[in-house]
Every structure is written in structure tokens, then in C-alpha cells.
Image (spheres, rainbow, N blue to C red):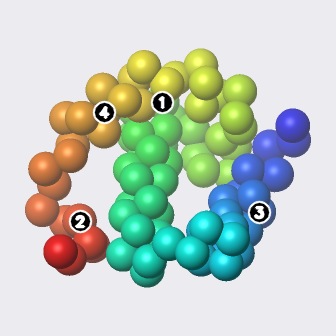
Amino acid sequence: MKTKELIPLLSEYFTTWLPDVKGVSKNTITAYQYAFQLLFEFMREVKGITFEKVTFSILLTHIAGIILYLSVNQNRTSSPVQF
């Protein structure tokens, strides 16, 4: 899969698949978007890879580090999700 395919797929996932096909709430979409923000933050800050260069292959290679990073950062106060 080409590098440039990830971002358009994510865009379609958030704008079409989740709301129209799955019928999830705006809060769910916001929470998912925040998780991807953290994922791209990890790739940039820890691995030095900008979001434009992230591929599915790179994500799979770094999945353990991503999970650890997300678990350490799960209580961040900057979360945009309000419950």
C-alpha cells in the first residue's frame, strides 16, 4: 500500500464510514480522532516519522511502542473529549 493512501483512508473512515455506515456518535468519532492524534504524535516525537510518511507497514512494525506510548499518555489533560 502506498504511503499516501493512509491519510485519505483515515479521512474517509472519520467522515463517511463511522458516521454513515456504523452510525457512531460525534463523541466516538472525536475519541477515535484523538487516538490517531496520539499515534501520529508518537510516530513524530519518538520515531521521527511525520504523518505523511506513516504507512500501515510502519504502524505494524511499531505497534508495541505505540501501545505503550498510548497507555502512558492515557491520562493527558489535553484530551478534547468531554464526557
Q: Which mark is residue 66?
A: none
Q: CA distance from mark 1 to mark 2?
A: 22 Å
In the image as oriented, which residue stretches furthest toward the right? 2
| Residue at mark 2 | 79
Q: What residue would you read off at disc 1?
A: 47
Q: What is the C-alpha distance between the residues marked 2 and 3?
A: 24 Å
Query: For the point 21% across and 46% down, which residue is it?
Result: 74
Q: Earlier in the sequence, mark 1 or mark 3?
A: 3
- Element carrying mark 4: helix
- Mark earlier in primary sequence (1, 4): 1
Q: Which residue is mark 4?
A: 69
Give the residue type at disc 3: Pro
Q: Which of the two discs, 2 and 3, labels the residue nearer the N terminus?
A: 3
Q: Secondary structure at mark 2?
A: loop
Q: Are marks 1 and 3 in contact (CB under 8 Å)?
A: no
Contact (CB < 8 A) between labels 4 and 3?
no
14 relative to 73 in the view: left or right: right
**Separation (CA) of disc 1 from disc 3:** 22 Å
**Rendered location of residue 60, percent (x, y):** 61, 24
Which image quarter: residue 81? bottom left
Evaluate if marks 2 and 3 touch, with contact meaning CB atoms under 8 Å apart.
Answer: no
At label 2, the amino acid type is: Ser
Residue to which mark 3 is pinned: 8
Image vertical order of residue 1 relative to residue 63, above or below: below
Mark 3 surroundings within 10 Å by alpha-carbon count, few (fewer than 14), some (14 through 19), many (20 or more): few
Where is residue 65? Give x, y as percent: 40, 23
**Inter-mark Cα distance, 1 to 4:** 12 Å
The alpha-carbon separation of the residues under discs 4 and 3 comes to: 25 Å
Lower sequence index among marks 4 and 2: 4
Mark closer to the chain start, 1 or 2? 1
Q: Amino acid at mark 4?
A: Tyr
Element type at mark 3: helix
